[in-house]
Image: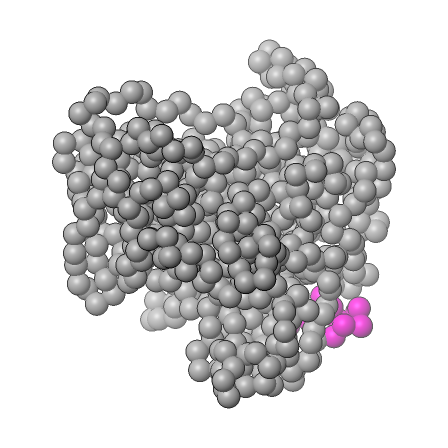
Amino acid sequence: MIDARFTRRTALTALGLLGAAAALPGGAAAAPAPRPGPRSPALRSTGRRVAVLGGGMAGLTAAHELIERGFDVTVYEPTALGGKARSIPSPGTGADGRLDLPGEHGFRFFPGFYQHIPDTMRRIPFPGNPNGVFDNLVAGDAFRLALPGAPDLTAPASIAPLRTDIYDPATLQQSLAAAFSLGGAIPPHELAVFLRKLVMFLTSSLERRTGEWEHQTWSQTLESDGKSQGYRDVLVSALTRQLVAARPAVVSTRTIGIMGQAFVWNAMGTVPAYGHLDRLLSAPTNEAWIDPWAQLLRDRGVRFEMGWAAEALEMSGGRISSVRMIDRSGGATTVEADWFVAAMPVERAVPLWSPQILAADPRLEGMRQLHTDWMVGIQYFLRRPAPIAKGHVAYLGSPWALTSISQAQFWRGDFAARYGDGSAHDCLSVDISDWDTPGILFGKTAKECSREEIAKETWAQMAACLADSGDALDENDVVSWFIDPGLHWGTGGIANDTPLLINTVGSWANRPDARTAIPNLFLSGDYVRTDIDLATMESANESARAAVTALLEAADSPAAPPSLYRLHEPPELEPARRIDADRYRAGLPHLLA
């Protein structure tokens, strides 16, 4: 996430301000690894047939960019278009002409620093919207940090810089101290440590971010040992566990820092190109985005072959010659094309790397070292609206690292009139980001619980965080609930079909580029190296654009490549970064270390 998973997820918001705080280390991703050298003319092709293997965010983006440039595109998707970003109807809940209640893998979150996703959205028509699907984004005005046994913190989703000269390191630290005091939840001396680290990362060179912060965990960087519970819950754990389902003891500081820097500049309003920090859709994802997108692609000629998954890549003459596909019933077929874009998640791509594939591109072997974790949602459909906050809510200190959004307040129309049997008036969508810590009700981890236990335990943890705020949750308001069907319970326990990539320390070296050494195979997915460097919808979209750019070059296409954007790096901090680059090359620590 995170975009969240952040889908990943996802990019969550309950952390707007906290994101700025908790995400401080470094900035833009390091320069990509060198591309493979020139290919033999015998391996080049000007063919137009493209097989896109996967119809999630990465696959749809690749299909969109390719069909606009005159290619013949077929998308093969085993489950449903949109992947983890889609909405999922709760079957059999609609009555009297209403739609089924809208479930989802996890709620959608579109931070203002996302640039690729908004660009795509503006190119998808939607009735009555001058800017297409983009106009279905609405702003969350505030976010809430709910702490059990302590006053909750509610803050606007943007903060104004206190000084116009905030890029001076000393002034920057003073401004951030005022902005991120978090109502005194963190002891002043510990906050000072955090702010020093924050400014240190904001002024770190790209070389240090890749060479040092990539190999240090978030917990190590923030010196979490011996700190207060508030420091560990808010500044160490919240951005990692509740935004991207990453464990602070293993996640790369560089990765969290890139996201954090983006939150900082977005929240402080210093980047005109960025939008509102906390944005979400005005309807369930399929209604507001995925269905119009798929229809646009069909209208332009994209073919969707549903129910088919890639089982093996076949090579001949140094190229991919075909893909063996299987369907849910065990049927098989062979797909031939001129170009292949592997747009499935990392856990589905790795089994395709046969010895022959790895011999042709040994770098793909590193993908076996990449890690995934769980970040899965549950939706509660309620008899009464539950506007706990005018934005996202982070339940700090909750064992399962919960974050929620009350959706009906942002969706167009009357919820009860449009969905279910008329008895539900709101959808409280909750992301569960920690599946390995015992809960407060049953004393079991989420992975040890049944569906019903997960529903009860999640509700109990939210209620505990809100109990002292006057916003008590009443379980009698629950009409029904829905858990992502990607979870399966069997004799061996619970399994998850939709895990989330986690950026562990040192994992950048194991992540591939969109272009492979196989001349007609390209990679598109949130595990591919991107500027945003986090498993999010934005990263998946960016990687697809990079794959299409590489494909156009390989095909000698005259078409202009897709637009690619980079996260903002304040030019005002460039002198400080140059100083740090010199110190890093000399083997010296950062000046603030």
Q: Would residue 394 appear left or right of 323 to someone viewing this image?
A: right
Q: Is residue 539 above or below residue 474?
A: above
**Any part of residue 227 in sight:** no
Instruction: Give the side of residue 182 with respect to residue 500, left or right.
Output: right
Looking at the rendered image, the quarter that the C terminus falls into is: top right
Coordinates of residue 517 in the picture (x, y in percent): 29, 29
Residue drawn 63% across the image and 33% down it: 568
Name the spot of residue 43 as percent of width and height, x first.
20, 28
**Magenta stretch, overall SS:** helix
Q: Where is residue 526 shown, x and y percent of the image?
A: 45, 44
Give the answer, above or below, for where 291 lies relative to 573.
Answer: below
Determine whether 270 is above or below 132 in the image.
above
Return the x and y of residue 527 as percentages of the image width and height: 43, 42
**Residue 272 is one of the magenta-drawn residues:** no
Q: Closer to the camera, 206 or 564?
A: 564
Place residue 266 in its image quadrant: top right
Q: How is the image coloured?
A: one colour
First to last magenta residue range: 459-472
Q: Is residue 351 above or below residue 98?
A: above
Residue at (19% x, 64% y) in the render: 330
